[in-house]
Amino acid sequence: MLCNHIKKHNLNIAPNNHGIKSMTDIDYIDKLTKSAVKLESDGHIEAAIEIFNKLLESHPNREEIWNNKGVALYNFKKYEEAITAYDRALLINPMLAQTWRNKGTSLIKLGRYEEAIVTCDRAITINPNYAQVWIEKGTSLRGLRRYEEAITAYDRALLIDPNLVQALNLKGLSYAQLEKYDDAQIAYDQSLKLDPNQIEIWLAKGLSFGFAQKFKEAISAFDRVLTLAPNYEFAQNARKTALEQMQKSLNNKPPTNSISPIPNVVFTPNNHSHKSTVLCNDENDDSEPKGFAAVAGMQELKDILIRDVIQPLRNPEKYKKFKVSIPNGILLYGPPGCGKTFIVRKLAEELGYHFIDVPPSLIGSKYIHETSSNIAQIFAEAVENKPAIIFFDEFEGLVPKRESLGEQGKLRNEEINEFLIHLNNAGGNTILVVGATNKINLIDHAVLRSGRMDKVIFVPPPDFEARKALFKSKLIGRPHSETIKFDLLSEKTEFYSSSDITLVVENAARKAVEKNIAEIDEKLLEQMITSTPPSIEKSQIEEYRLQGNFERK
């Protein structure tokens, strides 16, 4: 594939006596990078990624190549890998506002809203007039149901550019979530003045009017939807319900709270079930189960964490009596995209610990001694908020094998030793250090010795019950059939990671939009499963599992 695209676009990366030509000529590297970006924009994403990888073999310190690779991976829906590429760019140059923004977008796709907010703030610090970052910060805040703060973020974006339709739409939806329907209508009207053919915003107007008991205005808005999309079944049903409610109000009857012809939509005050069905994707709720109660399936993993982590931390005296060590830290390892971050968040909830998520880009620095200082600051923050879990994703980047570091060894040795000093004292400060990796063989052995991160726990792909729950959760906020057999979908996705299932549902949603399908049904999801193979194979899962059985030195 790569060769065909190279020939088609006249790209010369043939070897010569000095290696690859594109790797030795800076101007040519720039030209080849632009060509790869063009390939990516034309839809040849895999070919573009191959070229970026080839460039990075000899020029790993070119931040623009890492950033462009991240963009290609993002467009290929490999969000975790995109984040890794952006982090590499930011380690080289932490002042790249665009790259911070790109990373934030990937985190939003993965539902990691708190991390996305931190990332957006870094971009805003560099460039406070970056309107799109303010929008993405608002989106992250909406994901956490912090609607007032989200509106403030959208207003900041609109101060920079008053004609941002996206900011106006999201501002309106946030007001609707707060039941401030008049304010929502103002935002919708401003948006529709800029682009009057937005079907979903006319629908949002109609729903907001309906919940405000303004049925005549709701019918008018639904009529606009049906003018633009005559076969939009949801809008047809919504109009029918609004008409029925208006007729009842004219007959001096109170609006009904019985089930309407629209699935999950009833036009009664304080009823917002439409938001989780059509317009929004807010999955957090104070009424939702916390801790391991929110983790469907994965019983073996939960049992290990309860036995080896939770019980010793909750009953330290009992374990000390028999001279059983209390864990300072644990390491979770396994294939990428299998929910290691999610599990750690739920572990923190189960323990009632403060959760501190530390992305790699917030630690690393190109300045001497600054990384060690960053590590010390993170542990100091944990002490101030104890009991706490400090979570380090891509742990191998923080504590790599020292024998493999070469010329960087001296500086990195200082950083690893700084980490070990704080790790040794973590348990005494009621701090649990948790690392996550899919490259356990690259981690320094000293970190995994007894009394440090001596609990090494395999995180497999989601099991049957977990896959069912994933399909259900990813369909929240999307129109879907009530007759979907989730058991069948789970059976068909054995060995699929959490991110694979997310991609299946996203692909189904895209297909529904493209084909003007009213809702996602079981047949469509099965088609997407067939066209979306798992990113990991059974043999690879076993290889990951066996990696944990290495000898500690």
Image (cartoon, rainbow, N blue to C red):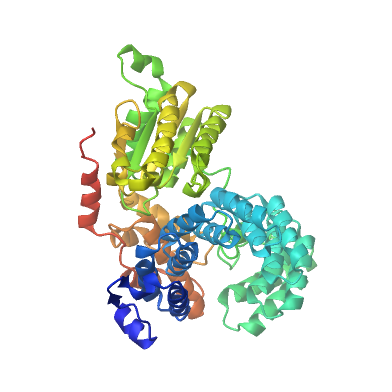
In the picture provided, is 64 more to the left or to the right than 524? right
Q: Which quarter of the image is occupied by the C terminus? A: top left
In the picture provided, is 273 more to the left or to the right than 242? left
Q: Residue 119 at what x, y percent from top left?
A: 57, 52
Q: In this orientation, which residue lies closer to the viewer: 528 or 481? A: 528
Q: In this orientation, which residue lies closer to the viewer: 428 or 11? A: 11
Q: Which quarter of the image is occupied by the N terminus? A: bottom left
The image quarter containing residue 102 is bottom right
Instruction: Determine the residue positioned at 46% across, 34% down.
Output: 350
The image quarter containing residue 35 is bottom left
Instruction: Determine the residue positioned at 30% across, 67% down.
Output: 533
Q: Residue 476 at what x, y percent from top left?
A: 51, 59
Q: Residue 338 at what x, y percent from top left?
A: 36, 51
Up/down of 532 relative to 178, above or below: below
- So how many labels did they put on this image? 0
Up/down of 430 relative to 69, above or below: above
Residue 28: tell me if it is visible. Answer: yes
Q: Residue 510 at what x, y percent from top left?
A: 48, 73
Residue 272: tell me if it is visible. Answer: no
The image quarter containing residue 535 is bottom left
In the picture provided, is 347 more to the left or to the right than 208? left
In the picture provided, is 61 more to the left or to the right than 149? left
Q: In this orientation, which residue lies closer to the viewer: 92 or 1? A: 92
Q: Residue furthest front?
A: 17
Q: In this orientation, which residue lies closer to the viewer: 515 or 61? A: 61
Up/down of 40 relative to 411, above or below: below
Instruction: Determine the residue positioned at 52% across, 58% down.
Output: 103
